[in-house]
Amino acid sequence: MNYEIFQWINGWSSYSPYLDKGMIFITNSVPYVAIVLMLFLWFIGNQEKRVKKQYTAVYAVFSCLLGLSINAVLHLFYYHPRPFVAHHVHQLVPHPADSSFVSDHAVLVFSIAWTILLRNDSWKYPVFIWAIIVGISRVFVGVHYPADVIGGALISYGVSLLVIQSSKKLEPLVQVVFNVYSGLTKHIPLLAKISYKDPSQER
């Protein structure tokens, strides 16, 4: 089933150069889009909602770091060959022949998407759709199986839920982040222009 679904999705590659370029762009732009999303959450929003969005950004980063750490450990103990190693596929992007399960890209994007969804942010649905499209793109370009993406989404859900449920225990660490930002605003004129509100007022 896993390989059959992979064949179906990957089989669409090479039919349209525009679709190929679009999927390559989506899969390669993940780190940059993730950074933009975090900056968007941190800086955009009215005075009442800004701090809540900043907490969401911090929790999303924590979830990403925890999820990627779990995946790194998993890769140390379990190796599953990538599709282009085990089969003849349409591979549209270069990639090392390391373990396929689970997808780092899926862990990254779904950690952000689940956190935003669980925090009930206004951008929850667009971000979740983006995460799904990224997951599909990893299969489309021939570097992951569907199970790799689903596994990444499940790990991300677990770590995102854990981070949010552990918010009280994480609060001292979150305050360190806010204090660093508060210090930066005193030295960087651009940041100083952005009004800052005590993060303890709203989470």
Image (cartoon, rainbow, N blue to C red):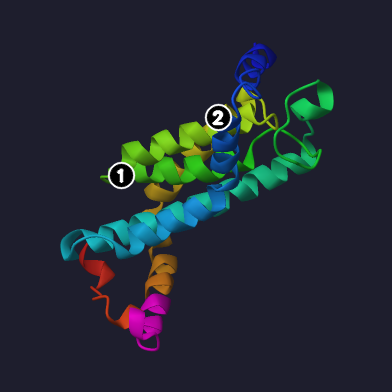
Q: Which of the two labelled residues, at mark 2 and mark 1, occupies the earlier sequence position?
A: 2
Inter-mark Cα distance, 2 to 1: 26 Å
Mark 1 closeness class: few <14, some 14–19, many ≥20 residues within 10 Å: few
Q: Nearer the viewer, residue 56 or 96?
A: 96
Of the 4 image quadrants, the one containing the C terminus is: bottom left
Q: What residue lies at 34% left-to-right and 80% top-to-bottom?
A: 190
Give the residue type at disc 2.
Leu
Say which mark, if any, is on residue 123. 1
- 95 left or right of 160 in image: right
Identify the secondary structure beneath mark 2: helix
- 55 left or right of 150 in image: left
- Percent position of residue 159, x then y: 50, 43
Label 2 belongs to which residue?
A: 19
Give the residue type at disc 1.
Trp
Quarter occupied by residue 145: top right
Q: Nearer the viewer, residue 84 or 50?
A: 84
- Tell me if residue 168 can be seen: no
Say which mark, if any, is on residue 58. none
Quarter occupied by residue 90: top right
- 93 left or right of 190 in image: right
Q: What residue lies at 49% left-to-right and 32% top-to-bottom?
A: 133
- 20 left or right of 133 in image: right
Mark 2 closeness class: few <14, some 14–19, many ≥20 residues within 10 Å: some
- Tell me if residue 96 can be seen: yes
Q: What residue lies at 44% left-to-right and 67% top-to-bottom?
A: 173
Does residue 186 show up magenta in the picture?
yes
- Percent position of residue 32, x then y: 52, 55
- Percent position of residue 144, x then y: 67, 30
Q: Which residues are magenta?
A: 179-190
Q: Nearer the viewer, residue 108 or 200?
A: 108
Of the 4 image quadrants, the one containing the N terminus is: top right
Does 195 appear above or below 159? below
